[in-house]
Image: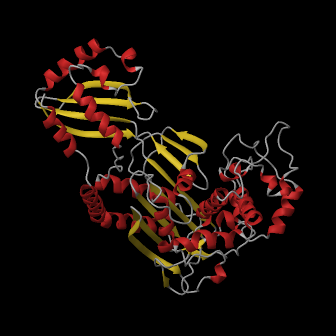
Amino acid sequence: MNYKKLLFFFCCSIVTTFNQVKAQDERLKNIKEALPKIDQIFKDYAEKNHYPAFVYGLVLDGKLIHSGNIGYANLEKKVLATNQSDFRIASMSKSFTAMAILKLRDEGKLKLDNPAYLYIPELKNQKLLTKDAPAITARNLLTHSAGFPEDNPWGDRQLAISDEAMLKMFRKGISFSNNPSTAYEYSNMGFAMLGYIIKKVSGKTYQQYINENILKPLGMNHTYWEYSQVPAEQLAHGYRWLNENWVEQPLLHDGAYGAMGGMITTIDDFAKYVAFHQSAWPASDAPEKEPVKRSSVREMQQPWQFIGVNQNYKYPTGRKVAMANAYGYGLGHATDAEGRRSVGHSGGLPGFGSNWRILQDYGLGVISFSNLTYANAGYFNVQVLDTLVALTHLKPRAIPVSSILQQRTKELIAVLPTWKNAESTGIFAENFFLDYFEESLRKEAIPIFENAGKIIGLKEIKPENNLRGTFTLEGEKANIEISFTLTPENPALIQEYHIKLVGK
């Protein structure tokens, strides 16, 4: 084999910065071509479901690339909805509370696995379901695993209560549906507690702390907690659809429960928050930016509390695929059987419904706000993302090929197919020739290379991660696929290897 020529092909296979930029431009071009179809889907959905207003945005690779506005933010005054209209986003607020908790954790001011009663003494003597139940922790509150009952209808009406009213309720005693750390059950109360913990630890109300430490660094300057502070021409009013008419719903004032669902924001502002979540993927050496470490953002998005598996989940397009659901810190997490991961959160209050969702591996996100009670924007956002991926043939972002994978690929190619003097190269781990025998390796590889014909290039390297990957040698008659895994040593050595003939 002409190894010099092969190494030339190896060098040429490395993806350049130019090609990466070109690929990004192509992604954007393809998505923009699909936007008329997406806009029509939004319009049809809004009309079918009687949304007074429906505003939305698409965020790609950290930029708001498209937005749309349908209907009226204020029906009585015929105020059209825009990107600058302020909608109450309800439980989409929860991830801001979670981010504030992680920021305080990162600063050493609290610990997620400490008992919550260290920060809220009123929780210390709660009567749990059994004597062997563990104490509630801040992590339980973040992941809806504190043992509180699902409380959406009731919790939605607690938005404006005072801290003292909330603490009085805790002193009286909480009713539990489960013991802490045993099951997922959605709890607005748990996030109201986190809001109070922020106050106890930071010395500022959760509103002040989030405003100063999250909203301001992100440039979210048109985001509020109290609706009376929103400029009248920007405030979206909420409605129900009753007896073929829209009925305006009273807006709730800000209070202790606002940490679970009180935020009021715009598409333009919230897109900055979505972009920050996107910036955490993939992990990189880039300088950190406020408001929190990228690793903490990725931590928020992890599936910390298992919810369940829907074996018969049906995408809006009709495609059936199993879906596993979990909860992170203030974020829902879903992974389907095709390996597609997404994170985000819905919001619903009397008068409002909203959702945001990102496909982490695709750099693509969607935001939707409506001023209709409990509008099901989540199902719709899944449809938008699924449709965009299908229409544009969007692929997950490629994992970068690490330098050690490139090096070991080059070195492994050099010993194939004869494996002559392979043991002396120093690139194989101590287990390798105990698990793979040189004569057997040679007898397996030589016929494969003969059937492939003359090797004309290295087609591609596909990393699974930093230390595992597959590469393809292109032959005149067939291709050869080789996969290998490296050890955790430094430098990492080849511990596992597989080879097979594949079609052109």
Q: Which of 421 and 308 is in front in this view?
A: 421
Can residue 233 be seen here? The reply is yes
In the image, residue 209 lies at what x, y percent?
Answer: 67, 70
Which residue shows up at 44% across the image and 59% down it? 286
Check the image and report above or below for 350 versus 7: below
Q: In which quarter of the image is the N terminus?
A: top left
Q: Quadrant of the C terminus?
A: top left
Check the image and report above or below for 353 versus 12: below
Q: In this view, does 256 lie to the left or right of 143?
A: right
In the image, residue 177 lies at what x, y percent?
Answer: 76, 45
Number of numbered discs overlaid on the protein picture: 0
Q: Is residue 36 left or right of residue 313?
A: left
In the image, residue 433 lies at what x, y percent?
Answer: 36, 17
Q: In this view, does 481 lie to the left or right of 454?
A: right
In the image, residue 401 lies at what x, y percent?
Answer: 33, 44
Q: Is residue 67 left or right of residue 448?
A: right
Question: How are the residues colored?
Answer: secondary structure
Q: Which of 490 and 209 is in front in this view?
A: 490
Which residue shows up at 39% across the image and 15% down it? 434
Q: Quadrant of residue 346?
A: bottom right
Q: Which of 380 and 307 is in front in this view?
A: 307
Q: Nearer the viewer, residue 249 or 311?
A: 311
Check the image and report above or below for 466 versus 279: above
Can residue 242 be seen here? The reply is no
